[in-house]
């Protein structure tokens, strides 16, 4: 009887001792992780965007006759961590190059013969495949992401090559096209970030193709989907 | 009865000892403790060879598709020096021909850019992890370069500087993917500056891994 009592009391105690080692022995994979140097750490994103409003300054530097300085504002709705839709409007201040000055002054070319964009808008998608958590000089943490964009573009253009109908150069008109590109974003605070965009536009307007390159630096304010 | 009491005492003691780790875990969690995950950087690979395809889209007269090769010596995780050269396969936009025919104007004094050699100081202040589509984790780094560049144009060989930023994703210990954006600024006659934006996508091969104590 005494032995039964002893066995009855000791057995549960021994069973209580078992779970730790028995559990770890069950899964070989977990045991390997414990013995490994590396610990896979899965964390939630620190920065999650939802509604993004931004203001930007940029340049259209490629055209030989005119360099454009852009002022733009945009809105993006980040549907998920990786996909967003975006709309943006640009206003341009165009600066004539010395080559165009020479052609206008020395050769009497009318200004209407040189195509330039006065404003344009774009709308499209943003795909963000990379989100990074980086150490800065091994001291502080920095967060950022890399994204690619694809936009449809509508532009207001002025000037262009002379035709039989318009021998003095083209008048104001609309241009249509697309703008693939990519960019990087660095987070400053939970709501503020700075982003750099590079886009290559492909515009078609009144029989002419235009291929301006757009560089843009933007400051963004974003609401967050997790707050 | 005495024996039974002893057994009961022993049982209670064993039961209390049974799960100390679990109790401790719960305690930390309840107190809202924070978990820091600190991983060591991989060892420095001293030597890196890189081959890249790129584009030089800035010139209104020629658009260049480039082939670039480089050798980089990594002193530490933070500093490196890069020796690079690129060759540009150029495609005329037709603008130069048009200007010649219509106005008899020769717009560029330097001609088309054929190749560039440069030596750069590389600073790599940002290193960390990238989540790729919230699915896979890769390590990577962001770096900045600046240095001396020498351009070989069809009609001139101007000196200049270059600077830029790059992003590297490590595929494994030896191979990495690189995205570089740079500006080559040449001074053909020290009067005007010729800016040449350069974008490239390359594959790097790193070797010559040092001892562990070489880490920062």
Image (cartoon, helix red, strand yellow):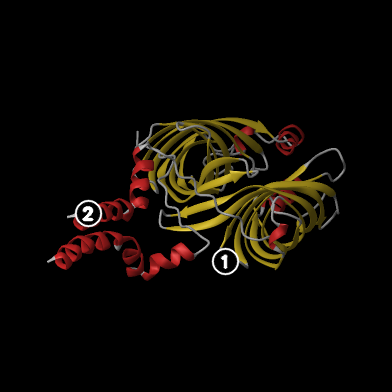
Name the residue that disc number 2 marks.
Answer: B8
Looking at the rendered structure, whether the residues under marks 1 and 2 are on a common chain is answered as yes
Q: Residue at x 73, y 37 (%)?
A: A103
Q: Bin the neighbour count of mark 2 within 10 Å (Cα to Cα): few under 14, some 14-19, many 20 and up.
A: some
Question: Where is residue B46, by image quadrant?
Answer: bottom right
Q: Bin the neighbour count of mark 1 within 10 Å (Cα to Cα): few under 14, some 14-19, many 20 and up.
A: few
Which mark is in front, 1 or 2?
A: 2
Q: Tell me: A68 left or right of B12.
A: right
- If the image is split into quadrants, where does the C terminus of chain A sit? top left
Residue B201: tell me if it is visible. Answer: yes
- Tell me which label, 1 or 2, sits earlier in the chain: 2
Picture coordinates of residue B148, whole percent (x, y): 82, 49
- If the image is split into quadrants, where does the N terminus of chain A sit? bottom left
Q: Which mark is residue B172?
A: 1
* Between A66 and A81, the one nearer to me in the picture: A81
In the rendered view, would you say B62 is above or below A64?
Answer: below
Chain to which mark 1 belongs: B
- Mark 1 to mark 2: distance in Å? 58 Å
Picture coordinates of residue A10, whole percent (x, y): 23, 62
* Between A159 and B172, the one nearer to me in the picture: B172
* Between A131 and B66, the one nearer to me in the picture: A131
Question: Where is residue A92, by image quadrant?
Answer: top right
Picture coordinates of residue A49, whole percent (x, y): 40, 38
Q: Which mark is residue B143?
A: none
In the rendered view, would you say B54 is above or below A219?
Answer: below
Question: Where is residue A80, by image quadrant?
Answer: top left
In the rendered view, would you say B198 is above or below A93?
Answer: below
Picture coordinates of residue B109, whole percent (x, y): 82, 48
In the rendered view, would you say A145 is above or below A26?
Answer: above
* Between B58 and A75, the one nearer to me in the picture: A75
Q: Tell me: A26 left or right of B2.
A: right
Q: Tell me: B24 left or right of B187.
A: left
């Amino acid at each position: 009887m005494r032995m039964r009592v002893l066995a009855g009391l000791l057995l549960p105690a021994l069973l209580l001792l078992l779970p730790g080692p028995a559990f770890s022995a069950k899964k070989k994979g977990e045991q390997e992780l414990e013995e490994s140097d590396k610990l896979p750490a899965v964390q939630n994103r620190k920065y999650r965007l939802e509604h993004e409003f931004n203001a930007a300054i940029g340049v259209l530097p490629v055209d030989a006759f005119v360099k454009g300085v852009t002022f733009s504002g945009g809105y993006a709705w980040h549907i998920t961590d990786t996909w967003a839709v975006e709309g943006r409007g640009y206003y341009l201040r165009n600066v004539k190059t010395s080559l165009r000055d020479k052609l206008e002054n020395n050769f009497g070319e009318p200004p209407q013969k040189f195509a330039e964009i006065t404003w344009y808008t774009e709308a499209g998608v943003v795909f963000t495949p990379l989100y990074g958590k980086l150490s800065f000089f091994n001291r502080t943490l920095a967060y950022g992401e890399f994204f690619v964009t694809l936009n449809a573009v509508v532009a207001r253009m002025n000037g262009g090559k002379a035709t039989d109908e318009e021998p003095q150069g083209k008048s104001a008109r609309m241009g249509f096209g697309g703008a693939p590109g990519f960019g990087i974003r660095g987070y400053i605070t939970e709501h503020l970030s700075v982003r750099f965009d590079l886009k290559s536009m492909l515009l078609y307007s009144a029989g002419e193709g235009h291929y301006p390159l757009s560089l843009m630096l933007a400051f963004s304010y974003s609401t967050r989907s997790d707050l | 009865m005495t024996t039974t009491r002893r057994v009961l005492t022993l049982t209670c003691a064993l039961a209390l000892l049974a799960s100390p780790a679990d109790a401790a875990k719960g305690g930390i969690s309840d107190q809202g403790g924070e978990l820091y995950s600190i991983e060591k950087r991989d060892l420095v690979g001293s030597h890196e060879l890189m081959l890249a395809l790129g584009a030089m889209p800035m010139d209104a007269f020629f658009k260049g598709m480039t082939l670039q090769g480089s050798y980089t010596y990594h002193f530490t995780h933070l500093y490196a020096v890069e020796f690079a050269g690129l060759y540009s396969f150029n495609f005329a936009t037709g603008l130069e021909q048009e200007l010649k025919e219509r106005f008899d104007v020769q717009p560029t004094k330097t001609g088309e850019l054929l190749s560039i050699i440069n030596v750069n100081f590389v600073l790599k202040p940002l290193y960390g992890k990238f989540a790729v589509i919230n699915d896979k984790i890769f390590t990577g780094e962001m770096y900045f370069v600046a240095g001396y560049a020498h351009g070989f144009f069809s009609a001139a060989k101007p000196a200049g500087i270059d600077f830029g930023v790059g992003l590297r994703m490590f595929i494994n210990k030896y191979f990495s993917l690189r995205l570089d954006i740079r500006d080559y600024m040449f001074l053909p006659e020290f009067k005007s500056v010729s800016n040449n934006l350069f974008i490239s996508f390359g594959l790097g091969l790193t070797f010559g891994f040092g001892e562990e104590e070489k880490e920062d």
